[in-house]
Image (cartoon, grey):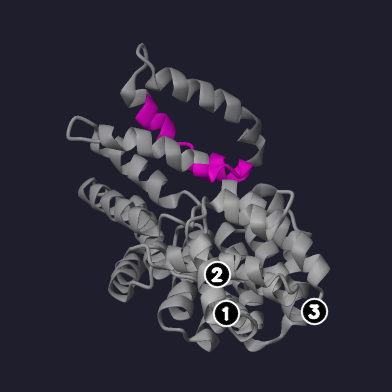
């Protein structure tokens, strides 16, 4: 995919023409459906999501079913973390269309993506139904990475839905047997889960080492999202071993990348709040906590990973022990009114 990344400006120009007064909506739909991996390769998934929102109202009965299926799959498969409900629904739409077309491969791919999104939402029934049906469709003659995509869904289900870290770790380790970093997108994602399990187990040195291995691989060249999410976990490990200056620099880079890569995501700021509290920047920590809590109250937002919640709770404990309730609530109220760019500037001045 990286070899196509320089064509992003051409895609933008083509989209602008297709959406314009002399353009063609069918061309725009088909073009959008072919670009989900391109946005990821360049780290502009948020831009892709905005494009899909423009095109989405055009998908009606006049659109050929295959074009509609491919479009909904692109919406679902875009490497975001902030629109899990919308993407899960798009995946089910794609699966239904592919199913009606007798397209077993397309149905399987759509269901695995649905399972991933439902797991992020901690939606047990949705994730399990998608995983179970996908398993019945898997063809042994397909490339190995497709089986790995199903395995990754099971890892997320065990980790986020069942909170069974031991099983999730075993599934992740089994999925990456025989793979090198960069061999498979989903094997790389399973590899990224391992430092998260290390964080949960309190093995911060191992988490740091795994992250550095991923960052040294070719995989991070192919996906800005993978790089940014690895940096988030690396920053969390550094916080927990007391390397606060390096953690600050790591999270600063990660949060800047993530704004473009996956949109306005909450979980990295759980680590930022913990860092701010440990740095003694209690007012800024309280503001960041207030921003996080406001996001948590929003309906249908994807869940925050358990290890990030642990950092959030640690930040809350430090702030609550150091500030009076009225002062703390005042700062939190200020934070609840901030947007992503504002909370980023508070956490990382100069950004």
The magenta stretch is 28-46
Examine the structure image and report whether residue 40 is included in the region drawn in magenta: yes
Residue hosting label 2:
289
Disc 2 from disc 3: Cα separation = 21 Å
Q: Nearer the viewer, residue 175 or 334?
A: 334
Q: CA distance from mark 1 to mark 2?
A: 7 Å
In the image, which is nearer the foreground, mark 3 or mark 1?
Answer: 1
Q: The residue tagged with tag 3: helix, strand or loop?
A: loop
Residue designated by label 3: 242
The residue to which callout 1 is attached is: 316
Asked whether, in this view, residue 318 is left or right of residue 142, the answer is: right
Circle nearer the N terminus (1, 2):
2
Q: Earlier in the sequence, mark 2 or mark 3?
A: 3
Does 15 appear above or below 129? above
Q: Residue at x 48, y 61 (%)?
A: 336
What residue do we see at 82% from left, 74% from top? 243
Of marks 2 and 3, the one in the foreground: 2
User: How far apart in space, not on screen, are marks 3 and 1 (Cα)?
Assistant: 18 Å
């Amino acid at each position: 995919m990286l070899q196509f990344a320089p064509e992003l400006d051409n895609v933008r120009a083509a989209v602008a023409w297709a959406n314009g007064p002399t353009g063609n909506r069918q061309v725009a739909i088909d073009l959008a459906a072919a670009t989900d991996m391109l946005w990821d390769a360049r780290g502009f998934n948020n831009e892709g999501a905005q494009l899909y929102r423009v095109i989405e109202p055009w998908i009606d009965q006049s659109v050929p079913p295959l074009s509609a299926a491919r479009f909904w799959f692109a919406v679902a498969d875009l490497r975001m973390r902030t629109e899990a409900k919308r993407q899960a629904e798009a995946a089910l739409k794609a699966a239904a269309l592919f199913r009606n077309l007798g397209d077993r491969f397309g149905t399987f791919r759509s269901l695995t993506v649905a399972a991933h999104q439902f797991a992020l939402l901690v939606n047990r029934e949705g994730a399990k139904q998608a995983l179970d049906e996908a398993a019945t469709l898997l063809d042994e003659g397909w490339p190995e990475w497709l089986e790995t995509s199903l395995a990754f869904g099971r890892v997320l289900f065990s980790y986020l839905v069942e909170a069974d870290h031991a099983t999730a770790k075993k599934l992740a380790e089994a999925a990456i047997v025989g793979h090198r970093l960069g061999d498979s997108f989903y094997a790389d994602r399973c590899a990224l889960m391992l430092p998260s399990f290390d964080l949960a187990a309190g093995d911060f040195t191992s988490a740091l080492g795994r992250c550095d291995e991923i960052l040294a691989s070719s995989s991070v060249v192919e996906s800005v999202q993978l790089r940014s999410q690895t940096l988030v976990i690396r920053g969390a490990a550094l916080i927990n071993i007391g390397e606060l200056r390096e953690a600050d620099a790591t999270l600063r880079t990660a949060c800047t990348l993530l704004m473009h890569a996956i949109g306005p995501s909450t979980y990295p700021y759980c680590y930022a709040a913990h860092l701010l509290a440990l740095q003694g920047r209690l007012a800024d920590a309280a503001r960041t906590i207030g921003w996080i809590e406001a996001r948590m109250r929003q309906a249908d937002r994807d869940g925050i990973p358990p290890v990030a919640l642990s950092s959030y709770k640690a930040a809350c404990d430090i702030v609550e022990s150091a500030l009076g309730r009225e002062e703390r609530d005042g700062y939190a109220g200020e934070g609840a009114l901030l947007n992503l760019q504002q909370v980023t500037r508070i956490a990382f001045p100069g950004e």
